[in-house]
Image (cartoon, helix red, strand yellow):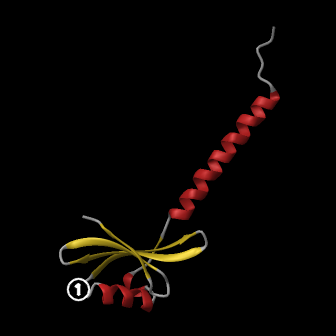
Amino acid sequence: MKDSVSPIRNRGAALLAIAASLVLCCSSAVFAGEDVPAAKLPEPVTKAIMERFPKAELIKAEKETEKGKVKYEVKIRTEGKEKEVDVSPEGKILEVDDED
């Protein structure tokens, strides 16, 4: 008796592997950001951060696109604490997270 695997089972395993690869690939592309120098941030983004955190020092910024929407994720230091601020290109603060 031959020890063989059904071609359908092989095809199913191959499709599952391809699907898993696509999910991993696409999900990492959604969350990967493009580094943006602080001097190149859109003026509304910088203005919104400086109005909310007048003593802020901009440390790092990334431009991200998630579900077709662009946002800027900006790491700042203010009053001895680091924060991550998500801001829309129009200057709306979407979220503030304490990093410390």
Picture layout, residue 59 above or below residue 10 = below
Instruction: Determine crowd level at label 1: few under 14, some 14-19, many 20+ residues with C-alpha closer than 10 A.
Output: some
Point 51% across, 63% down: residue: 31
| Residue 96: % across, % down | 35, 73
**Left or right of residue 61, residue 65 in this image:** right
| Residue 91: % across, % down | 44, 87
Q: Nearer the viewer, residue 21 or 47?
A: 47
What is the quadrant of residue 48 in the picture? Answer: bottom left
Point 68% across, 47% down: residue: 19
Picture layout, residue 32 above or below residue 5 = below
Point 75% across, 36% down: residue: 12
Point 76% across, 29% down: residue: 9
The residue at which mark 1 appears reads as: 55
Q: Nearer the viewer, residue 59 or 65?
A: 65
Picture layout, residue 51 above or below residue 79 = below
Residue type at tag 1: Lys
What is the quadrant of residue 85 in the picture? Answer: bottom left
Q: Quadrant of the C terminus?
A: bottom left
